Image (cartoon, grey):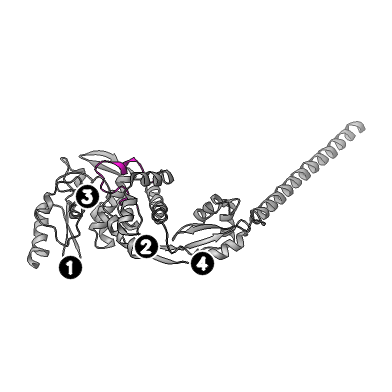
Amino acid sequence: MANRNKEIRDSKSFSKLLSSIIIGVILIGVCLIGLGSYFYINASQKPLNPNDKSTTKIEVLPGESATMIGEKLEKEKIIKNSTMFKYYLKFNNISNFQAGSYEFSPSMTYKQIAKSLQKGEVYIPVAFKMSIPEGKTIDQIADVVAQNTKITKEEFLKAVNDPEFVKKMQKKHPKLITKDVFNKNIKYPLEGYLFPATYDFTEKNPTTEEIVEKMLKATEENAFPLWDKYGGIVIKEQGKEKRLTFHEFLTFSSLVEREASGLTDRAKIASVFINRMAENPEMPLQTDPTVLYALGRHKSVTYEDDLKVESPYNTYIHTGLPPGPIATSGRESMESVLNPAKTEYLYFLAAKDGKNYFSKTYDEHLKLKEEHIDSQQ
């Protein structure tokens, strides 16, 4: 009996010892993981290369998130880990970054980089700014470029319409520029692909390639997040579902941009075009800006004879979307196309008072035309 009691006591002692060992191992493991994490986090915040004082130009666009900025910094080998940079900003409640052109070095710490981004300490002085408004054609953009640089309008247009130049841009932006821009009916390959915005230039005499590259990047930074957010766009053509390509999306957005007179009407205008394409048989979009684009003129009034111009861009004589964009389009028009209003409207008109009037039937449309246009002449 005594031996049995001794065995029980020994067993309990061993169990306690084993438990203590297991707990100790776990505690040591937790401490090691904690120390490892501490050293890893500390190491990740240190400069990538304290001895490398060379700088790289980094462009921070308006509205870019911490994730997007971190990925740029990692890609350009300014920091080691973009995820750790994002968490550093988050845990330190650092936000409100200033857009601009910066010069960052691998010798900079997270703290130094974040401080620069917050204060907008642009290391490269801005030589000049150039504004491209929404709804402008590439021909009009060429005018703006000529007014702000030493590049002539003719030189700019020659470059952006050169197939070799476009292919070069395509290699740099394969997701953005597809084979669609080389369609034989396309008037200008990069029409609608140069994002409307105010651009800072740090060199007094940028090249055409530098200007176009900056605008294409801005299109990617603004259009792709919206495209991904809504998962693209599916419409109906004569009752059959069709998923639009990115090129068709930019084309659609440009029509809305050129027709819209106010932010609130864009989603309704998009719905009119969608409803027309869904009709069986399909109704032509009949939007005047496509006629003016086909004519190559900027007119305040479109006449009956203008509507007869033979061009694949003329949406009075051809159904569906035109071959490509007819102008630049801003984020509001892009989002309106991706998230259109749900309506039954098939018609709308822009009155002289600056308002758009929508109707479901042709009779209603004629009544509104008489009231807001014909009677005002």
- Report the disc number at residue 353: 1
Residue 231 can be seen in this image: no
Label 3, residues with CA under 10 Å away: few <14, some 14-19, many ≥20: many
Viewer-closest of 46 and 102: 102
Q: CA distance from mark 4 to mark 3?
A: 42 Å
- Secondary structure beneath label 1: loop
Q: Which residue is mark 2?
A: 150
Q: CA distance from mark 1 to mark 3?
A: 23 Å
Horizontally, residue 57 falls left or right of residue 295, namely: right
Amino acid found under the numbered disc labelled 2: Lys
Please tell me which residue is depicted at 26% across the width and 63% down the height of the picture. Answer: 262
- Report the disc number at residue 120: 4
Residue 77 can be seen in this image: yes
Q: CA distance from mark 1 to mark 4?
A: 42 Å
Q: CA distance from mark 2 to mark 1?
A: 40 Å
Amino acid found under the numbered disc labelled 3: Phe
Q: CA distance from mark 2 to mark 4?
A: 29 Å
Q: Nearer the viewer, mark 2 or mark 1?
A: 2
Magenta highlight range: 175-193
* Of callouts 4 and 3, the N-terminal one: 4
| Residue 332: percent from left, percent from top | 33, 58
Magenta residue check for 184:
yes
* Of callouts 2 and 1, the N-terminal one: 2
Q: Which residue is mark 3?
A: 273
- Secondary structure beneath label 3: helix
Please tell me which residue is depicted at 57% across the width and 62% down the height of the picture. Answer: 114
- Secondary structure beneath label 4: loop
| Residue 118: percent from left, percent from top | 53, 66
Q: Nearer the viewer, mark 1 or mark 4?
A: 4
Amino acid found under the numbered disc labelled 4: Gly
Magenta residue check for 141:
no
